[in-house]
Image (spheres, rainbow, N blue to C red):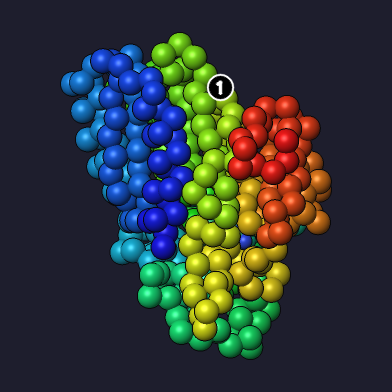
Amino acid sequence: MRSSANWRKALLLVALLHACSAVDEHSANFVLFGTIVSIHAFDTTEPAFSDAMSTLETRFSALGVDWYPWADGELKRINAAIAAARPIDVSPPLASLIKAAARFEALSGDRFNAGLGHVSALWGFHALPAGVTSVPDADAISAILATRPGASDLGWQHLTMRPGAASTLLDLGGIAKGALLLEARRLLLQHGIDNAIVNLGGDLLVIGQVHGRHARIGIQSPHDDYPIAGLQIASGEAVFTSGNYERYVEIDGTRYPHILDPRTGQPVRHTASVTVVHTDPVLADAAATALLVGGGADFDALVDAFELEFALLIDASGDTRLTPGMRQRLHWTATGNSQ
Ligand code: AMP
Ligand code: MG
C-alpha cells in the first residue's frame, strides 16, 4: 500500500523531469523501508554522482534503522529506556530530532504528537501491509492516551534524556523525512553537487536549479493518479504532502489511515491531504502532518502557529483551503478543482 502510493507521487516528478534530460543530468532510485528515494542531479559528472549516491545510500540505510521505532536501532533502545523509566544518552542527530518533535507538539497544540507508537501499533500501522483484522479496543487506546504520551515531557540535560510518560513510544515518522532531506543536502553539497532534487516518496527538497531554472513539480490528487496542480520550487525549498490515502489498514472494508488524532487515538479521515512548501524541510514535514490532523477547522490557527506562507489543504469531500501565498503560486490543471 505504502509503496504504490509513493511510486505514484514520485512518478509525477520524474515525468516532469523527463522532458529536460541532458548529458550532465544523472538520476538514481533506491527503496528504503518501502519508500522510494529518488535523486536527480544536474551539472555534475558521473563519478561524482556515483560517489555521492553510495555515501547517501549507506547513510540513509543506517538512519532508517536508527530512526525507526520498530527496527533494531537507536530509537528502539530509547523507547526501551522510556518504558523502563531509565535515563539514556542519545546521539546528537536523534536528540535534536526528538527535541524538534517536542517543539512541534507545543506549536500545534498537540495535533502533532511523536509519542503515539503504542496507539499506532494497536492499529497495526507498524505491520503493514498485514495490519490488523479488527478495530482496536477503545479502552486500550484510552488507557494509553490518559497518561499523555509525547516527546514534550522528556527531560534533557544536554544529550542525556530523562524519560517521561511510560506510555510514550517515540515514533518520528511525522518528521523523519524532513530530517533525512537535510542530511541528503549536506552530503550532496559535500560531494560538490549543488543542483539536485531529492525526492523521498513524493516529499522533496530542491537544491540549486534545474538547468538554470526553477524546478517544476506536480501535486498529486488525493483521489487519483493525476496532478491537480503544478508549482515552481525555488532553490532551498521543500515540499511535503501528508495524505490519508498514503498508508492505511483496511478492516471490514473500511480504510483507516495511518495519521492519528492524538486527542482520540483515531485515524484522521476528515482531511484527504495537506501540502506545505517551506525552506525548512523538518518544519514543512511536521506542519503537513499537524494540518492534516487539525483539518479545515484548525487551518488558519495552525498556519499562524507554524508561520506558513504556502499551505494547501484538501478535505475528504474535495473542498480546499489555501494560504494567499499558495493561491498565487499554484497552477491548477484540468483535474484540479479550485482554479
Ligand atoms: P507524515 O506522512 O509526515 O504525515 O507522517 C505520518 C507518520 O507520522 C505516521 O506514519 C506515523 O509514523 C506518524 N504519525 C501519525 N500520527 C501522527 C501525529 N498526529 N503526529 C505526529 N506523527 C504522527
Ligand atoms: Mg510529516
Given residues 331 and 236, the one toward you in this image is: 331
Above or below, 155 relative to 39: below
Q: Is residue 193 visible?
A: no
Furthest toward the top, the residue is 212
Position of the N terminus, as image quadrant, is bottom left
Given residues 322 and 238, the one toward you in this image is: 322
| Side (left or right) of 1 relative to 334 | left
Per the image, the residue denoted by label 1 is 234
Given residues 178 and 198, the one toward you in this image is: 198
Furthest toward the front, the residue is 334
Q: Position of residue 333 (x, y in %)?
A: 61, 35
Q: Secondary structure at mark 1?
A: loop
Q: Position of residue 329 (x, y in %)?
A: 67, 27
Above or below, 209 relative to 180: above
Given residues 101 and 180, the one toward you in this image is: 180
| Side (left or right) of 242 relative to 321 | left
Q: Is residue 24 visible?
A: yes
Above or below, 114 relative to 42: below
Q: Residue at x 71, y 59 (%)?
A: 317
Position of the C terminus, as image quadrant, is top right
Q: Residue at x 39, y 34 (%)?
A: 14
Q: Mark 1: few, some, or many residues within 10 Å (few <14, many ≥20)?
A: some
Q: Residue at x 38, y 20 (%)?
A: 20
Q: Amino acid at mark 1?
A: Ala
Q: Position of residue 268 (x, y in %)?
A: 64, 65
Q: Position of residue 98 (x, y in %)?
A: 53, 52
Quarter of image, res 51:
top left
